[in-house]
Amino acid sequence: MSGQSNYNPKTGIEKWLDARLPIIRLGVDTMIFPSPRNLNYWWTFGAILAVMLVSQLITGIILAMHYVPHPDMAFDSVQHINRNINWGWMLQPMHAVGASMMFLAVYIHMFRGIYYGSAKNPREMIWIVGMVIYLLMMATGFMGYVLPWGQMSIWGAIVITNLFSAIPPEAAGTAVTQWLWGGFAVDGPTLNRFFSLHYLLPFLIVGMVILHIWALHIPSNNNPTGISIKTKADTLNFHPYYTVKDAFAIVVFLMIFSYFLFFKPDSMGHPDNFIPANPYSTPAHIVPEWYYLPFYAILRAVPDKLMGVVAMFASIGVLFALPWLDTSKVRSMRYRPLAKQFFFLFVLVCLGLGWAGAKLPSDLVFVTGVDADGHEVGLTFVWMSRILTIYYFAFFLVILPILGLVEKPKPRPASIEASVLGTDKGDN
Amino acid sequence: MSTPVESDEPTRRDFIHIASGTAVVAGAGFLAWPLIDQMNPSADTLSLATIEFDVSSLEEGAQVVAKWRGKPVFIRYRTAAEIEEARSLDVNVLKDKQTDSERLVPGPDGKLKPQYLVAIGICTHLGCVPLFDPKDTKGGEYGGWFCPCHGSHYDNSGRIRKGPAPTNLEVPPYWYMSDTVIQIGKEASV
Amino acid sequence: MLKRIVSLAIIASFSAGAVFAAGAGAKNKTQDWHFEGMFGTYDKAAAQRGFQVYQEVCAACHSLKYVAFYNLGDKGAPFYDPEYPNPNDNPVIKAIAKMFTIIDGPDESGDMFERPGITADKIPNPYANEMAAKASNMGAFPPDLSLITRARADGSNYLYSLLTGYEDPPEGMKLSPGMSYNPYFSGGNQIAMGAPLTEGRVEYTDGTEASVDQMAKDVVEFLTWAADPKMEQRKRTGWVVLIYLFLLALLLYGSYRAVWRDVKH
C-alpha cells in the first residue's frame, strides 16, 4: 500500500473483476509489500497469532454446536463433547489449550514490541490497536473459562465480576454487578450472556486485527535495528521471503502446541474445574488462568479493595501510553545499554508477579528466621508483589521517560542494508 | 534476488517448494476430517441406532409402538384371521405390489413368523402417524391403520389400500436374534 | 466478599501437584502407572478388575454418571474387543449392562418402571438425588467418580494413597463421630468414608489375589480410564501429528533456505 501496486491483471476475467472489486489486488498488495530484510524470529509471532486466532474461531464454532449454556447442562455438555462427539476429545482441548498458547504468543509479541521500540513513532496506532486486541482477548479468555461451569469457572466469574463491587454502592456499584449478573449472584443468566459475548468478541478481534495489519502497512514493519527503511536495498518482499519464514516458525510453534494438546492437556488448567460448579462452596485454592496471574498479583498487592482494582486496571492502561512514555529517539534497545538491562529486569518482574499471583499472599518466598512463637518469618509473597508492582509502574512512568533523556545510545548502523552486510560498525 | 517460483518449468530448486506445499495441503486435508466428522452422529446417538424388542410380551391382536431413531415403529401381533386376510389378497389390486410374505423376515429357524408384523409408523404420504384400532373404524376400512391427515387406509400388513399415500408402510431393517427377540436397525448378518 | 475469597486463594495451576500435596496432608505415594508417559496405555486386565471393584464396592455409594455401558467397550476401554468394533454388539458389554437395573418411564399409566440395562444406558446412580445421597451418608455426599482422578491434583496417585492410607488416628486425636483417619485426604485428616477396601473384599474372576493394594491399584487404573477415556487415541494421534509436523518443519526449513539463498541476511 505504499502507492505502487504489484498486481497486473492478465486475463479478461481478472481485469473485469479488478475494475469492479479489486479484491485480488488487495490480497496481492497485502502479501507482496516491502519489509525490512533483517527481521528475526521474534517477528514471526504475528503470523503465529493469526493462525491461532483462526484455530480458536474454528474450534469455537464447532464447540458451540454441541455446548449447552445452561447451569444444569453446561458441565455435562462439555463431558459429552469429550466422551461422545466424534473427535470431541481433540477439539475441546484444542480450544482450551489453544487459548493458553495464544496468550503465550501474544506476550512474546508484546515484549518484542517493547524491546525493539515497535510502539514508537510512527507506529503508535499499531500498538494501540494491538492493546485493544489484547484487552478483547482477556475478556474473551475470561468468559470462555466460565463456560465449562466447573468450580474454577464459577468462582473466577464471582471474583472478577465482584471487582466492580469495588465501586461504592452509592456510586452504583451494586447496580453494576446486578446488571452484569442478571440477578443477585453469578447464575444461569450470567452464563448465558457470557456465552453470547464469548462468541461475539472474537469477531471484534478479527476486525481489530484487520486494522492492526492495515496500520502496519503504512510504515511497514519495524526491525531489530529500529532504523527506518531508506532505500529499496533495505527491503525484501513479504512474500515469499517472510511467508516461508513465518510458515516454518508456525510449524515449530504448532509442535509445542501439539505436545501440550495431545500429551499434557490438563497442565494449563486446574483440577478443580473438573468439579461441577457449586455456588455454595468455594474451593480451598482459587487462581485465575496463568495468563492473568501478574495482574492478579497487582490486585492483591494493594491493601485497599478499590485501589487494588484501580491498580490492576492501571497496569494495563499504562501500556496504552507506552509510545509516549518511552522518550528515547532510538527505537531498538539493541543500541540502548541501560534500557536493555531495565527491560530484562522488567521481563523478570512480570514473571515474578505471575509467580506471586499463583501463591497465597502470606506464603513465604524465602525464610529469614523464626519468630518468638516458632513460626517461620521471611519475605511474604504479598510483599514481593508490592515490590514488583512498584517496579512495574516505575518502569513505564519513571525509568523509560527519564532514560530516554539521559541515556547515551551506542552508534547505530547507517542503514538496514549496512547492518546486514556488515559494511558498517553496528554491534551485531 | 530472483523470486524462485516464477519460471514456467519447475526447476530442481522448486522441488522443495512443491514438496512443502504438498505437505501443507495434505496436512490441511487430514485436519479437515475431524472438523467435518464431528457433525456426524455421536457415540450416544449411535448406541441407540439399534434397539432390541422382546415380542413375547405382546398380546395377540395388539400392537406396541417402539421408538427407534426418533420414529415410531409398529410391532403388531396379528391374529390367524388377520394373517389369512393379508395372505389371501390378490396383489394386483394393490398400488404398491407386495405380498404379505415379502414384508416379513424369517426367524432363527429360517421360517417366517407371520404373526409379527413390523413397520415404521409413518404415513408414506406426508409423514403423519397412522392410527391403529382393530376394534372400530379408527383403524381404517381394511383392518390395519388409518392416517387421519389425508385419509390413507392401510391393511394389517401395512400395505396402502386407499387414499393418497403412494407406497406401503416402510419395513425397517430387523432380524430375529432369537425366537422372541428382534433387533431393529440391522439386517441379519449372513 | 472479595477479601474473603482473595484471602482463601492460592496456588499456581502449573505447580499445583507438589504444592497441593504439601498443603493437604501427607505426600502422595507415587506409583509407576501403566498409563503414564507419552507411550502410556491402560492395563486392560487391571482396568477390568478395577471395574469389578467399582461395581462391587464403590457403586454402592458413588455414581459414575458420565460413563455409559457402550463406553466400556470403546477403543482404548477396559472391555474393548477388536471383534466388535461397535461396542453395542459386544456380548460382554451387553451382559454388564444387563446386570444393572435402570429406572425408566413413565409408562402409559404414568409410573416409573424398572428394566435391565442396555448398552446405551449410563451407569445408574446409586441414589435418586444428592439429598438422598447425603441422607444415607450422615450428611456427606459421596462424589461422582467419573472425573475423580482429574479433579484432584496428581489424581491417580492421590486416589491410590487415599484408598491404602487408612490408619489409626495418632494418639490424643479425637475423631468426630462416624469419621475415619486418613492422612492423605485432601479435605483434612478426617474422612467420612470408612476404609472401603479390606483383604479379599472382592473375588477376582481372573484369580488375582485381592489384596487391598491390588484392589486400590486396579480401581485407580479403571477410574483413570473413566476420567480420560480417549487417552490412548489422543496419544496415538499426538504421535502422528508430531511426526508430521517435524517432517513438515524440515521441508519448510529447506524451502526457507532455498528462498533466502541469494539474500544476505
Image (spheres, helix red, strand yellow):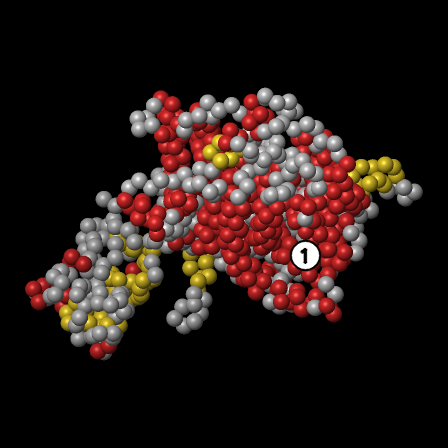
Foreground: A18 or B66?
Answer: A18
The residue located at (74%, 70%) in the rendering is: A170
Local SS, label 1 = helix
* Residue B144: x %, y % from top left: 20, 70
- Identify the image quadrant of residue B3: top left
Residue at 62% of width from left, 64% of height from top?
A: A180
Question: Considering depth in this image, is A298 or A49 the residue closer to the camera?
Answer: A49
Q: Which amino acid, by three-letter code, is at mark 1? A: Val
Occupied quadrant, residue B74: bottom left
Q: Position of residue C253 (x, y in %)?
A: 47, 27
Q: Residue placed at 66% from the left, 64% from the top?
A: A177
Q: Which residue is mark 1?
A: A159
- The residue most toward the right is A372
Can the viewer see residue C9?
Answer: no
Total labels: the figure holds 1
In this rendered view, identify the residue nearer to me: A261 or C254: C254
Q: Chain of mark 1?
A: A
In which quadrant is the C terminus of chain A drawn? top right
**Horizontal placement of A53 versus B87: left or right?**
right
> Where residue C87 sits: x, y (%)?
39, 45
Taking C73 as reference, is B18 above or below it?
A: above
Residue A54 visible within the image: yes
Identified at 64% across, 54% down, the residue is A156
Residue sitting farthest toward the bottom? B136
A406 shown above or below C63: above
Residue B161 on image: x %, y %: 15, 69
Q: Residues within 10 Å of mark 1 (few under 14, many from 20)?
A: many
Front residue of B143 and A394 = A394
Q: Identify whether A379 is placed above or below A41.
A: below
Q: Is residue C219 left or right of residue C107?
A: right
In the depicted structure, whether residue B11 falls above or below residue A370: above
